Image: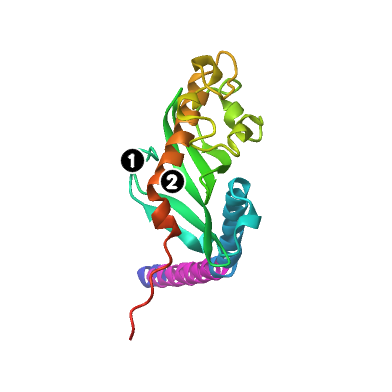
Amino acid sequence: MSANIASRNALRTGIILLIFAFVGTAILAFTHQSTEPTIVRGQQAAKLALLSQVLPATLYDNNLLSSKITVAPDDLLGNQQDSSLWLAQRNGLFTGVVLEAIAPDGYSGNITLLIGIDANGKVTGVRVTAHRETPGLGDYIERTKSAWIDQFAGKSLTNPPPKNWKVVKDGGSFDARAGATITPRAVVRAVKNALEYFAKHRAEFNAPPAKEPPA
């Protein structure tokens, strides 16, 4: 008799736990489904805000986020894995691009960058999105801590001349904080390389979109 009672109690407990698990899973699924669109919109807004820091919104009227293209590793971009670029257009014409690039030779490793370049090959903005440089010494490359990164705006492969794409200490045109030249050297090289990548692929960026084949 007692064995039957214990068995029924165990069965009842198992059913109750199963019901709770089912209800809990349903609640979690509903919460995820109802909040996911909001999360996605927030992520997209944050990404667009970051892109707009390096490429002025006045340069494009297309959906910049939807223009994202995956590009293969390239020495000029410093990436060992696929990265992304975003093509800007205004009135159907190519007006600029945002490139993801990496300076692999920072003091403490990779420095990840977003670099905006207009259709004429001029830098419209640069932002550091990730780095591991020494706090207080090499982290002035972050826009939130210093305006140092702004000196790239308006620069191109001819302004300054190629020989001057170096920090002042090395005879170039770019300022660098005394005692912390490894980090800015890496960023300067990465931006110049990104401009060279742009020049190499400019015709592809400027090409009209491929037409859909006739049905």
Q: Amino acid at mark 2?
A: Phe
Residue 59 in picture, x, y percent from top left: 61, 56
Q: Amino acid at mark 1?
A: Gln
Which residue is rendered at x = 38% and y = 37% of the image?
78
Q: Mark 1 packing: few (<14 Cα in 10 Å), some, or many (20+)?
A: few
Of residues 142 and 181, the one nearer the viewer is 181
Which residue is rendered at x = 52% and y = 21% of the image?
172
**Vertical order, 72 against 1 (above or below):** above
* Magenta region, residue range: 7-31
Q: Quadrant of residue 210?
A: bottom left
Q: Secondary structure at mark 2?
A: helix
Residue 211 in picture, x, y percent from top left: 38, 74
Of residues 1 and 15, the one nearer the viewer is 15
Q: Are marks 2 and 1 in contact (CB under 8 Å)?
A: no
Magenta stretch encompasses residue 150: no
Magenta stretch encompasses residue 15: yes
Say if residue 111 shows up in the picture. no
Say if residue 208 shows up in the picture. yes
> Where the C terminus falls, by quadrant?
bottom left
Of residues 117 and 160, the one nearer the viewer is 160
Q: Which residue is mark 2?
A: 198
Q: Which residue is mark 1?
A: 80
Q: Secondary structure at mark 1?
A: loop
